[in-house]
Amino acid sequence: MKITGIIAEYNPFHNGHLYHLEKTRQITGADHIVVVMSGDFTQRGAPALVDKYTRTRMALACGADLVLELPVIHATGSASYFARGAVALLHNLKAVDCLCFGSESARPEDLARIGQAIRQELPLFQKNLRGYLSTGDTFPLARHKALRDCLGDVPLSKGLLDSPNNILGLEYCMAIQDFASPIQPVVIRRKGAAYHQTKPDGTFSSATAIRRIIEQNAPFSDWSSHIPAPAAKILADALYKRGWMGANDFSLLLRYKCMETPPEKSCRYFDVSEEMANRICNCLNGFTDYESFITQIKTKQITHTRAARGLLHILLDLYQPAPRPSACAVTPYARILGFRQGAAPLLTHLKKTSRIPLVSRPAKSLKNDRLLDTDARAMLDADIHAANLYESVLAHKSGTPFVHEACRPIVIYPDHPPTSNS
């Protein structure tokens, strides 16, 4: 059984994601594709447009076989935390042959070579990163300079470290090296709009551009051509029933959390530095809404994304995670969000090979001391808390009943051939 992994957010699923799935199956010859997907909150430090179960259905409708949730502590972290958590999950399944990801220009062998050079010069990288930050460089610029210092004679293509997808690809390759994983990285050249493109771009528009259209409450016809037909129907149904979610929907909750959290306690939250904690305190009287508060506290050293992540971690009560040397400690369970009916043999196979438990009923798993240790239960409890917070705000906004995360059934999607818009 040939199994390939994909790491994604699908916020929302669009034509570029369908192209990625189809090319992944074609290039790797995969019998099954396992997707590790962010839950209800994303790496950019914001809530997902629609809930994780809707996005799971969209992925399964377009060719994914199994969707697993990336724990929230990794899903909302920097590129390094995000990549290590997702790669550890795939590695722990002990059945995944390849990890397939998109890149603007990089080759996996180049990323692997760069990652090895950085690993050999890690103290130099950390020292130079701090040095560049202290001179006023932004974090992305400081990281780029520090990485370049470590590479020596290793060739570096122009713009290789400027793209978010290339940076993630580098982190995937480094995580594979760290865990001595047999998973083989496979790169697919991205098509269409850039990651941060804010305007629609023909057939392959970015998720950012599509979100912008939907957040303007535009009609179905304005955005449906950018999304595969089966996924567009699922998304349209979800938007009709409950609407979409944005950071400002959490404004009052964030203000309350910041009001009750003094700077000395804020520093204990993940991604919140002493400088950021003080800025949060000093700017709080000018708080109007979530998104404008991010802009208020950002500086040259505190990027918009870093500020957004820090505030989200305060909102979700996520503290700085302890260093976790082994893959099993990094991601100690695999939470199943959904699978395609025809992929039942895949689940049977993974239950035999996986060295971490497959969690289908989180409430039951939390009570089983033999299934999850203390750290794993705390991580899963944080996932459930984040999901319930998202659901609480969504239920209030849409006027629909609240559904507790422990009562959510796994998505089981009926079999049919993957469908494209072509």
Image (spheres, rainbow, N blue to C red):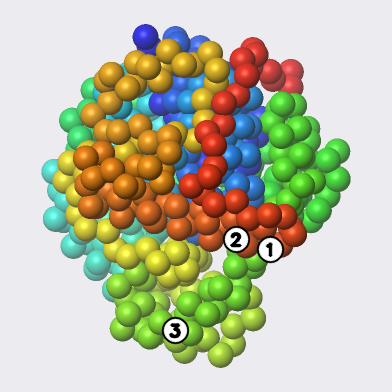
Quadrant of image for the N terminus: top left
Q: Secondary structure at mark 1?
A: helix
Q: Which mark is residue 392?
A: 2
**Sequence-wise first label, 3 or 2:** 3
Which kind of residue does numbered mark 1 sit on?
His
Quadrant where the C terminus lies? top right
**What distance separates the C-alpha of mark 1 from that of mark 2?**
6 Å
Up/down of 255 relative to 126, above or below:
below
Query: Mark 3: which amino acid?
Result: Glu
Q: Amino acid at mark 2?
A: Ser
Mark number displayed over residue 260: 3
Residue located 36% across and 77% down the image: 266
Q: Residues within 10 Å of mark 1 (few under 14, many from 20)?
A: few
SS class, disc 3: helix
Q: Quadrant of residue 145?
A: bottom left
Tally of marks: 3
State the mark number for residue 250.
none
Callout in the foreground (3, 2) = 2
Q: Residue at x 35, y 32 (%)?
A: 358
- Which residue, given by chain and number where applicable, does mark 1 sit on? 396
Q: Position of residue 110 (x, y in %)?
A: 31, 31
Graded by Cα atoms within 10 Å as few (under 14), some (14 to 19) or many (20 or more), the crowding at tag 2 reads: some
